[in-house]
Amino acid sequence: MAQEWYYSKSGQQKGPVIAQKLKELAISGQLRPSDLVWHEGMAEWAQAQKVKGLFPKAPFTAPPPLPPTSTTSVSETSSASLPPVPPLPQPSTATNPLTRRFLGVPRWVWGSIGASVLVLGGIRGYLETSGGTAGPKTGFTADTAKRDDGEQMALQRSQSVNDLKVLLLAMLYYENAHECFPPSASYSPEGKPLLSWRVHLLPYIDKACSGFSDHQQGVETRLYEQFHLNESWDSPHNRTLIAKMPGGYRLPGSTLTDKGRTNYVVVVGPETVFNGPKGTGISEITDGTSNTIMIVECDDEHASIWTTPDDLPFDRTNPARGLGGHFGGGFNAAMCDGSVQFVSLPQPVEILRAMFTKAGDETSNRGE
C-alpha cells in the first residue's frame, strides 16, 4: 500500500494523499517548504522542506498561505480507516515587536522587504498629501541638510527605493488576502475601468506602515473609504479626492505641478503581470518573481493621475519607452519578489522585454 501523507494549510489538516501527489503540490507551489507534513510512523509533524526529494533543488519562490476557508475539516478520503493523526502544533504568541508587525504576511517576504523598511527609522511619505504642488517631498526619513546636486539626487533615489518597498509590502499583503495581486484597475459590470490599483492598495499601505512610530493608523484606510468604488475616477465625487494623493505616491524630487499626478505606474498589457480585470497569482509568474517587474518609475510625460486606471502600456518593440528620466542612467524597478532593483538604461530590447513578461521563458541577464 502506498504511503499516505497529511499536510496542513492555514491551520487545517488536509489529506491523506500519496507521496506523488504531495510532490506535485510542492512543485506547483501549493505546498510550501514551511508547511507541515506527517505520515504514519512519524512522531510529530515536520516542515515539508525536511522531506528529502520533495522540493526541486532550484531556488523555490513560495506562495503565501491560503486564506482561511470553511471551518469544515477537509478530507480527500473517508476517515473511517485512517490512522490517528497528531494535532497540529499551535503557533506561539509573538512577543518581538518586529515579528508582531509582520504577522499575517508570509515569512518568505520578511527578509526581502520588512527588515529593509524597518531600518529607515520613520515613515512619513504616506502620512502626507501632496496637494498637487511642486517641491520636495518628505520621504520615509526627514532630512533637511543641504547637499550638492549629486548628493541630493542620490538621496532622492534612495527615498524612491523606500517608497517602492512600502508599495511592494502592501502588494504582498493584498496578494495574501486575495490570492492574487490587484489588477491595474477595478471594472464596472459593463467592463469599464473605474479606479486605479493605487486606490485599492490604500488599506494595505495602511497595514504595511503599521507599527512605525510616525504612522497614524487608519489614514489610508479612511481615505479609501471616501471613494465611491462603483464610480469612475472622474465622477463628480471621486474627482474631489485626487488632491488627497498620499505623499508616498509622489516621486521624491518630482517637479510635476499637476494635482495628484504620480510617476509610480505598472506596465500593462498581454504577457505582463497586469493584463485585464483579473489579478495575477504568484504561481502564474513562471519566469520567477525575482526576474519580473511589478512597479516602475516613469517619466513626467507618462505620469498619471493617481486614481485613474491609466498606466504604462507594454511596448514589445521599445519596452524602455516612458521609463526613468529622473535619476540618470536608469530607473528603480520594484520586482514581484519584494526587492527593488536599479535597472540601467539602455538595455537590449530582449532583456528589458523579458523583465516585463511573467511567463515568457526568457532570460533577463542584464548589464547593471
Image: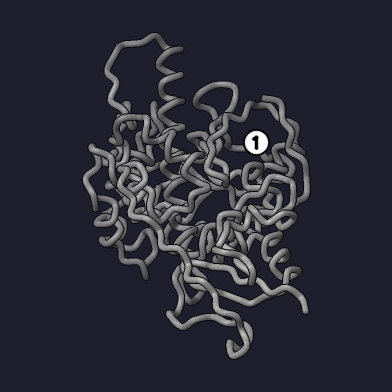
Colouring scheme, one of rainbow, by chain, secondary structure, one colour = one colour
Q: Seen in the image, is 158 located left or right of residue 282? A: left
Where 214 sits versus 326, above or below? Answer: below
335 left or right, relative to 307: right
| Up/down of 82 relative to 231, above or below | below
Inspect this view and state whether residue 246 appears: no
Residue 83 lies, with reference to residue 172, above or below; the image says below
Q: Position of residue 295 (x, y in %)?
A: 53, 43
Tell me if I can see residue 306 in this picture. yes
230 on left or right of 29: left
Q: Residue 124 falls in which quadrant of the image?
A: top left
Residue at which label 1 appears = 320
Secondary structure, mark 1, is loop
> Identity of the amino acid at label 1?
Ala
Q: Quadrant of the C terminus?
A: top right
Q: Of all residues shown, which one is farthest toward the top?
A: 148
| Residue 129 image-quadrant placement | top left
Quadrant assignment for the N terminus: bottom right
Q: Residue 45's x, y, as percent?
A: 55, 63
Residue at x 24%, y 53% (from the top left corner): 218
Pinpoint residue 315: horizontal percent, then vertical percent. Answer: 68, 45
Q: Residue at x 36, y 59 (%)?
A: 234
Residue drawn at point x = 53 percent, y = 35 percent: 340
Q: Position of residue 189 (x, y in %)?
A: 48, 76
